[in-house]
Amino acid sequence: MYATNYHRPSSIAEAVALQSSSDEAKYVSGGMTLIPTMKQRLAAPSDLVDLRHIAELKGISVNGSRVRIGAGTTHAEVSASPELAAACPAICHLATHIGDPHVRHMGTIGGSIANNDPAADYPSAMLALGATIVTNAREIPADDFFTGLFETALEDGEIVVAVTFDAPAKAGYSKFPNPASRYAMTGVFVAKAEGGGVRVAVTGAGANGVFRHAGLEAALSADWSADAAASVTVDAGDLLSDIHGSAEYRANLVKVMAKRAAAAA
Amino acid sequence: MGVEGIGARVARKEDKRFLMGQGRYTDDMSVPGMRYAAFVRSPHAHARIRSIDTSAAGDMPGVIAVLTGKEMLDDGIGNLICGWMIHSKDGSPMKMGAWRPIAHETVRYVGDAVAVVVADSMGEARDAAEAVLVDYEVLPAVTDAVRALEAGQPQLHPEAPGNLIFDWQLGDSDATDAAIAAAAHVTEIRIVNNRLAPNPMEPRAALGIYDSAEDHYTCYTTSQNPHVARLVMSAFYNVAPENKLRVIAPDVGGGFGSKIFIYPEEIVCLWASRRAGVPVKWTSDRTEAFLTDAHGRDHVSTVKMAFDADNRITALKVDTIANFGAYMSLFSSSVPTYLYATLLSGQYAIPAIHANVRAVYTNTAAVDAYRGAGRPEATYLLERTMETAARELGVSPAELRRINFIRAFPHQTPVIMNYDAGDYEASLEAAMAAADWNGFPARKAEAASRGMKRGIGMSCYIEACGIAPSAAVGSLGAGVGLWESAEVRVNAVGTIEVLTGSHSHGQGHETTFAQLVAERFGVPIDSVSIVHGDTDKVQMGMGTYGSRSGAVGMSAIVKALDKVEAKAKKIAAHLMEADESDIVIENGALKVAGTDKSVPWFQMALAAYTAHNLPSGMEPGLKEGAFYDPSNFTFPAGCYIAEVEVDPETGKTTIVQFVAADDFGNIINPMIVEGQVHGGIAQGIGQALLEGVHYDPETGQLLTASYMDYTMPRADDLPSFKVSHQVTPCPGNPLGIKGCGEAGAIGSPPALINAITDAIGNNDLTMPATPQKVWAAALAAGN
Ligand SMILES: Cc1cc2nc3c(=O)[nH]c(=O)nc-3n(C[C@H](O)[C@H](O)[C@H](O)COP(=O)(O)OP(=O)(O)OC[C@H]3O[C@@H](n4cnc5c(N)ncnc54)[C@H](O)[C@@H]3O)c2cc1C
């Protein structure tokens, strides 16, 4: 790891000020992505601005059907939240299957979506739930937020404050873990809104990161069932190929995980 | 057996310090003035070094020295060597290219060291290492051994044209061909044994300390055999003469073979310590470990197995290409030859065997012994072939094995080995009973009702441990003898130190070796200390690998105990005015048989040291040493059965049961033996289902350089193992033990692949059987 300066702000304003005072500064939340990257000397921020001691980023609330999860909420907190279990158990299930207990007790939802790892779990939930990403400057629909591999709509210095979404009528998540990293080799999040709209988002499989699958959405809109998902043809064309799985294999997994997610919802 | 003697499940003495975080590993060692080394490593698989500019790095904060291969050459530091001579079938010696500890002029794999920085802190050393400017002329690379043999491929070493190190054979080619021509059935199969990274929990580390006043060197290192390290470093690398070099391998966190070899880094730390005038420590990080630890396996073979009309094997013909990586590591040449082809008879009476092995250079990390070393490759090949043959012949796998089992001992195979004892049927039956083999069809049907494909597979392995008679291995090309030494020191208060040339890096020697003494003298194991891993304390030793610490190391201790016992009895007889032949040792006392006369053990020891009243002419003291050279290898054998369920939708394999029935001969501590079996099976499951080193075939970049991409077995990948032991004592050593350290890793991979291929109905599957491969194979078979 290269030498770095550590800062501990207690408000968003203070954090933004610290971040902007150096062009090589970075926010750190759980550090579960950033710190290993620094240890491998692949990232060298001059300053680390710790977001873990800012009250505005904390907490889970459910107001009627509107769900709000503070960016600083850990995966373990999401996994164990009774409010979320009532409003959207699929997101609890998703959080329970991120990494290992150490990672779940440190890593945060804000860090995960800001990082937008193409194999991370949360981006699929955000997209399928039609969530809104609330930052210190604006509100960004999930459809506009995830822009590519490790790329988001966040401007330099912008902080994710929370995510919000309407509790779905039904939702399910099914993940096939990469055998080595146990990130998603393919993860599919299916959600049916109270109004009836169906959104299906796929993580881990896309060559450009998380994406919605129109064919699966159409099939599940017509008939919410595992069989309906199984009838869809998934094109391997835009999918990722690597030593762990070919595009054809991932195409198969998209279908199988969609089936299982629909059945679990 | 006493409560702490032979056969007792004694909890490990060493666990307290390990579990309390108080183990002392090489990286825990710290000496005044110590500095840190970081290596500059080649980012290219193959390149010529045009120039190295160290000036910017030398000016960085904290930097004490930046050293290159040129300076090492100027100082006369020698090439790394391979210590086992193999001759090709044309009589020519193996063609060893030069391996410089720091590359000079050419780099041959990603990770090859090109310079070393010594600095005040690890961080400063790494920062400066990045500032060393190396100008490379990148050359084409080849990582696949089969391809490396083809015409027009990149050439690694001028000494080895065509990248061929040797083309070796064993067995009778004509007799084998004749038997195949006359066979009723011939099973043919291509077998790939995947390359593995050893992954001990503790990465390698070295601390070199040069004492200019004494012109003496001390090396702390993560070694399985510190004496061999000292011998090789002084005899071949010109680091220092043996009497001026002390090598200490303190607590070592696993080796699995990878810490047998002498690597560039410990030589560099010693040399740099003299050059820079400070003690120098280097600790590998995990990616460096993936890049530079010697890998294991990596064979491609074609096999023909011939049968007569009664399904008896009449011949076996094997043609193997073994990937050696960029350089010949210390024992690399022995692995695919004398540790491999000599085991190709398996548990079967095979009249004719011929093996041909070509060893090949590629632009990858060196390949050498890894848990099992050659024997897993032989077992996998043979047991996959047996399973394939059983399917082709329409015979049950158990029946085909039974028909061919060796049943009379000693048995001379056509490939050197002389099996001394065994009962293969006993292990087969025990395993089949434990697995409820006959109940499998019902379980398969039940799984099918859940949409799962269930399969069962077995593997009957044999291996050779306790390497080995020194004269025999010498005649086969070994550069060293493979005996072991021991010294037993009884202190004046009766406590006992056992000095051993074996090295414990997870095996539990501090417990099992003490159990031998407890058994012999009836003293508590707490009064026995095991001393190992330091060339200044233990005179000489050959170290631990090839499951030899029990069969060879403990046999040396037994010889020394015999001498101590004889002298102790003489002293006791003298003290009690009895006849020496009437003295028996029981519960910590020396007694005159049939009387109530006795002398406590400690009193006898005190008498030895006060020397006030010893038999006339007897030397004072009680300390005896012994060297033990085995008369043969030992032959652990057993039967493993795996039962799996494959999810046809995803290709994911779940191991639903795993049975191991092993014959290790007599057992000193069953709990430790079971632990060795569990660990070995975990690694075998890793090889079969999860692990595999991948290099990019064009660029030679290592694609599996961290746990993000290299799949280590985890607890939830493993079932609970059903382990049992059948015992045919080994006639070749005083304890009747055979060795247990590698069996799990040897016997398990073929059982698993036989089970998966049974489940999916497609025999065409390579390791690791990842979900994607199993899915594709099931699909190809229309399942
Ligand atoms: C062993 C291991 C296994 C893992 N397995 C999985 C898995 O199975 N699935 C999965 O999805 N993830 C997995 N992860 C990643 C884990 O979920 C991380 O916690 C997560 O990706 C990043 O969250 P963090 O809070 O740790 O972010 P950090 O590492 O602190 O930061 C990541 C990035 O986001 C930025 N950032 C952080 N917080 C904010 C914010 N509020 N606003 C703007 N930018 C911000 C940082 O500057 C940095 O660039 C794993 C990680 C490890 C170490």
Image: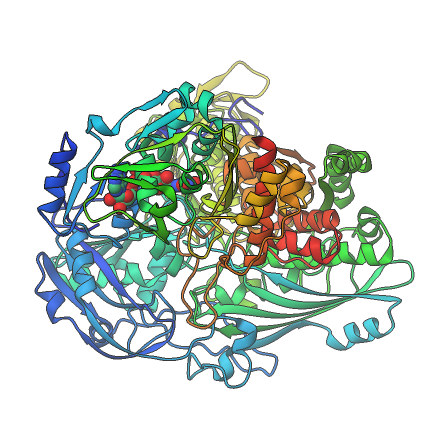
Image position, residue B169 (x, y; %)? 64, 74
Left or right side of B686 for B327: left
Image position, residue B623 (x, y; %)? 38, 39
Image quadrant assignment for residue B486: top left
Left or right side of B480 for B438: right
Quadrant in which ligand 1 is drawn: top left
Q: Residue at x 57, y 42 (%)?
A: A257
Q: How is the image coloured?
A: rainbow
Depth order, front residue of B645/A247? A247
Left or right side of B735 for B565: left
Depth order, front residue of B329/A89? A89
- A60 in relation to A253, above or below: above
Any part of residue B663 in sight: no
- B267 in relation to B138, above or below: above
Image quadrant assignment for residue A135: top left
Image quarter (top left, top right, bottom left or bottom right) of the C terminus of chain A:
top right
Q: Residue at x 70, y 53 (%)?
A: B778
- B235 in relation to B750, above or below: below
Q: Residue at x 47, y 79 (%)?
A: B95
Image quadrant assignment for residue B467: bottom right
Q: Residue furthest front?
A: A195
